[in-house]
Image (spheres, helix red, strand yellow):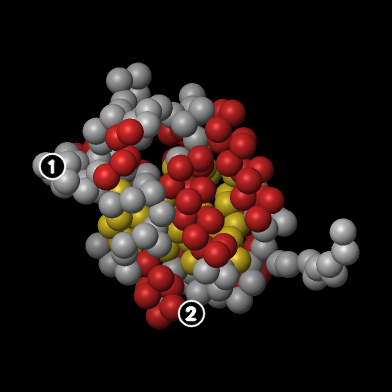
Amino acid sequence: MTGIERSKRELIEGQAALIVIDIQGELFVDREDEAIASMPDYDSRMAQSRLAIDKARECNIPVIFLQEVHRANLVDFGRELDGDEDIHLLEGDPDTEISAKELDFRPTDYLIKKRRYSAFFGTDFEILLRGLKIDTLLLCGGLTDVCVHYTFVDGHQSDYFCRVIEDCVAGSNLEAHEAALRAMEYLQTGARRSLQETLDAMDKVS
């Protein structure tokens, strides 16, 4: 196989945006009967995203919240219920709302509502990214193996630099979480980044 010369990429290339994926409902509650399985330290990982959100605001990096939401009559679920997931995130359910208290969600923040796993599918997400002249997507939230992964893949295929903040994502289980992180690193070398690395990189562009 012919080797390809690859220049080392910065964690943040050009203009960045912090993408907060599906951190919804109240954190630190009993999740045993949840419609979607999650790894044991899910809530603490979601809560750590607040550090990235605060730093992004301090550094004038746009923060874009993603919210999965489905109509109460289930018409827009499609094939989503054919796997392990049960009915979830219905309009009007308090658990569907962004975790506003924990994340300091503000009415002036950017919010993209989506019916599918990827933020790019059937939304105006990419129109917003183009308007903000974004080059790098900094991803946090859940699930690592579902909405984070599929948003990452579509971002990659749309030629964005994609970074996933490992401390601030969580999967449906630990095995799936780790597999998804490996898959994203396969697509873009250096995609997996720690929270501290990301905070330091944000400081450099402020």
On screen, residue 41 versus residue 23, left or right, reads right
Quick check: marks 1 and 2 in contact, CB under 8 Å? no
- Amino acid carrying label 2: it is Lys
- Name the disc covering residue 72, or none: 1
Q: Nearer the viewer, mark 1 or mark 2?
A: 1
Q: Nearer the viewer, residue 22 or 168?
A: 22
On screen, residue 157 versus residue 66, left or right, reads right
Q: Quadrant of residue 89?
A: top left
- Amino acid carrying label 1: it is Ala
9 relative to 99, above or below: below
Residue at horizontal 67 percent and vertical 63 percent from the top: 11
184 relative to 111, above or below: above
Residue 157 position, x and y percent, is 55, 64
On screen, residue 159 versus residue 131, left or right, reads right
Residue 24 position, x and y percent, is 32, 43
The N terminus, quarter of image? bottom right
Q: CA distance from mark 1 to mark 2?
A: 35 Å
Badge 2 marks a residue whose secondary structure is loop
For label 2, the crowd category at 10 Å Cα-Cα, with few meaning under 14, some 14 to 19 and many 20 or more, is few
Badge 1 marks a residue whose secondary structure is loop
* First-in-chain label (1 vs 2): 1
- Name the disc covering residue 157, or none: none
Residue at horizontal 69 percent and vertical 51 percent from the top: 186
The C terminus, quarter of image? bottom right
Single out the residue that lies furthest toward the top.
Answer: 32
Q: Quadrant of residue 35?
A: top left
Residue receiving disc 2:
133
Residue 151 position, x and y percent, is 47, 55
42 relative to 133, above or below: above
